[in-house]
Image (cartoon, helix red, strand yellow):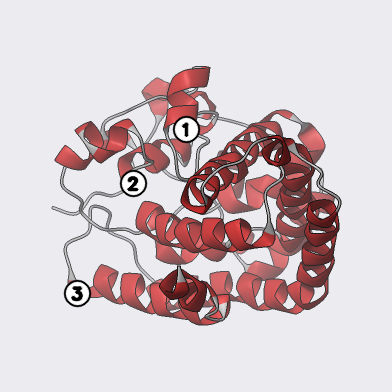
Amino acid sequence: MEFLNRLLGIDPNYIIIGLIALFFTLEQIMGSPFNFKKRAHHLLQNVLFQIVLVGINIFFVTFQVFSIDWLNNNGVGLLYLFELPIWAKLIVSVAFYDITAYWIHRATHKIPLLWRFHRVHHSDTTMDSSTVFRFHPIELTMVFGLGNIVTAAVFGTDVFSMALYYFILYIFFFFEHANLNYPKWLNSTFGLIFVMPDHHRVHHQQDQFYTDSNYADIFILWDRIFGTFKTMPLEKMKFGLVEFEEDNKQTFLYLIKCPFINIKRTTSAPDKRTPTTLKK
């Protein structure tokens, strides 16, 4: 437990910097399934989202921690009805944060106002490890951030388990989005319980039939249980959204303001898709 305390005591920004440095470097020196160009420019546009988020989080994280601590101090939530070993409570709490995120994620695809912000993440036509940063800051703070407070209110989760959840989540996010070749056996082993890159690539597929699936971040079990799990061959994938294919719609400034622009959601017919360029 002392080791876990020290690990979670590390500034999350250092963890994120380490993960992007690792995965982005691996994408440049190892085999990758998709042939994308202008990686440095793409990285810069996506990093700008993270810089804005860090600035906003100075204020919002304080509010989030204060709210969850208040709920804990007043014994609010299901976990206060049971006595569990600390390790069991941590595992269950991480699962509670993840299943809440699953349902919020589904909502961002189905509710038009939420989709306006969430489509920023799906707009990336050349997904790689830096796509992890491409979230509209309003979505992360006001939707998923408030969702953490709701999780604590309903289930009785605490700040420590939230820190553990995010530590695991960061690793999964970079693992899932990276433009790297992964062994297929992952899907039939760990992929029975956890989200694998091939699962999340389906979620970023341009065809809305596939985009609206595989919502889970850590446990693919939620998609399997609630009927939103889908698969498709790697060679048929085309990332992004049809309405964001132009280069001028891939810039940080455009994506920050696009939730406030009326952009009609469109999808290409499955038989007319042009797959993302695969490396030979």
Which SS class for mark 1? loop
Q: Quadrant of the N terminus?
A: bottom left
Instruction: Please report whichever mark, 3 or 1, sits nearer to the chain's N-terminal start.
Output: 3
Q: Identify the residue position indicated by label 1 in the image.
A: 214
Residue extending furthest toward the front: 83
| Amino acid on which disc 3 is placed | Ile
For this rendering, which residue is in front, 265 or 103? Answer: 103
Q: Residue furthest top?
A: 227
Label 3: which secondary element: helix
Locate residue 260 relative to residue 194 in the image: left or right: right
| Residue at 65 percent of width and 46 percent of height | 119
The residue labelled by disc 2 is 197
Residue 263 in the figure: left or right of residue 13 = right
> Label 3 belongs to which residue?
29
Amino acid of disc 1: Asn
Whether pointer 1 and pointer 2 mark residues with C-beta atoms closer than 8 Å, the reply is no
**Mark 3 or 1: the one toward you:** 1
Q: Quadrant of residue 199?
A: top left
| Nearest-to-viewer mark from 2 and 3 | 2
Amino acid of disc 2: Pro
Residue 56 occupies which quadrant of the picture?
bottom right
Q: Position of residue 191 (x, y in %)?
A: 29, 36
